Image (cartoon, rainbow, N blue to C red):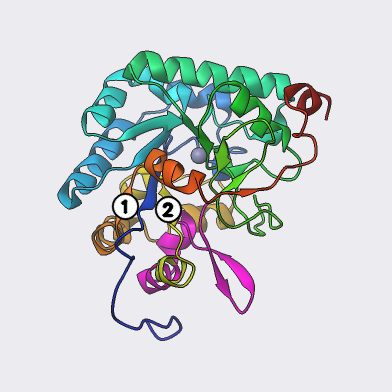
Amino acid sequence: MNAPFPDPSGCVSGPDIVNGLSVDVEDWFQVGAFENVIARGEWESIATRVEDNVARVIDLFAEADVRATFFTLGWVAQRHPAMIRRIVEAGHEIASHGYDHARVFTFTPRQFAGDIRKAREIIEDCSGVAVTGYRAPSFSIDHRTPWAFAELAEQGYAYSSSVAPVAHDHYGWPEAPRFAFRPLAWSGMIEIPVTTALIGGRRLAAGGGGFFRVLPYAFSRWAIRQVNRDEARPAVFYFHPWEVDPGQPRMAHAPLRSRLRHYTGLDRMAGKLRALVQEFRWGRMDLVARREAVRAQDLILPGCAAGVDAGAAA
Ligand SMILES: [Zn+2]
């Protein structure tokens, strides 16, 4: 399966490049693909699997001695505070994935400000450490919601990793930069988009999620090498705890397309992740953010230049 992806042997990531490794911590029933099948109000009554799955992920990272960032829902942190402490005790960064996975473009700026404040307060109470990173549910900061950056900066976030700079049926902002940028004139906060690779000038999603599970590992290896070696930039990779859980309940009533996306390759996921974390150099997103801050391009977005008030009026 290696044939379509050039795979010259040799160095992997350069010695100086640390790629960003991230986990979006949500339970198996909270994913966007099932939002029309499982109502938000039913969550309380569904058997949780997130603690066991996060424990598996922590063990997998420990085997390879890597640290990562766990972007966690406030809703999950509220119900699993001991899990949050275990993540922090293992040396990982705890960060915010919003409160209950509502996507940014469903909020007004004021509602969004409330959501990220609530999530951060819960996670900080559980963990005892400051939260400085944010990832939007389903990479939902896009051309509709540039004001979100102003709200994040106003609340003291150092970085966001909430943009998928690619065209996709559920998300994406194909015009956004592929690497770190500074969206605000008045703040040093940076956005670090999830990784894309270039093939013939086209951008392909290459930072994880369903693509990593469905495509051969050789594609991810090729893509991350391209980014590290040819572009000399860090990759940003993400996955979910439920992706290492082949035994999770099957949602028979979900659309076929959603089921294919959600369940394909679950049994091979842990093995692929082991290969990935051992082959490349990885670190927490806050480390990647500090390193990328000096290289981030300024991209002052309309509605952001004058700060929060302009954002709120947008
Ligand atoms: Zn998510």
Is 7 above or below relative to 204?
Answer: below
- Secondary structure beneath dot 1 equals strand
Q: Magenta stretch: residue 195 in it?
A: yes
Q: Distance between the residues labelled 2 and 1?
A: 9 Å
Q: Are marks 2 and 1 in contact (CB under 8 Å)?
A: yes
The image shows residue 222 at horizontal and vertical percentages of 41, 73
* Mark closer to the observer (2, 1): 1
Residue at 64% x, 72% y is 202
Tell me where the magenta segment starts and ends, as one range: 194-223
Between 55 and 88, the one nearer to me in the picture: 88
Question: Considering the image in quadrants, where does the C terminus appear?
Answer: top right
The image shows residue 297 at horizontal and vertical percentages of 61, 51
Between 33 and 183, the one nearer to me in the picture: 183
Q: Label 1 crowding class (10 Å Cα cut-off): few <14, some 14-19, many 20+?
A: many
Mark drawn on residue 292: none
- Secondary structure beneath dot 2 equals strand
Q: Label 2 crowding class (10 Å Cα cut-off): few <14, some 14-19, many 20+?
A: many
Q: Which of the marked residues, 2 or 1, is nearer the chain's N terminus?
A: 2
Between 244 and 70, the one nearer to me in the picture: 70
The image shows residue 264 at horizontal and vertical percentages of 42, 60
Residue at 65% x, 50% y is 171
Q: From this viewpoint, which residue is outermost toward the bottom?
A: 3
Question: Considering the image in quadrants, where does the N terminus appear?
Answer: bottom left
Mark drawn on residue 282: 1
Mark drawn on residue 237: 2
Q: What residue type is labelled 2?
A: Phe
Q: From this viewpoint, which residue is outermost toward the left?
A: 63
Is 272 above or below relative to 9?
Answer: above
Residue at 57% x, 66% y is 204
Q: From this viewpoint, which residue is outermost toward the right?
A: 313
Q: Quadrant of residue 187?
A: top right
Q: Is residue 78 visible?
A: no
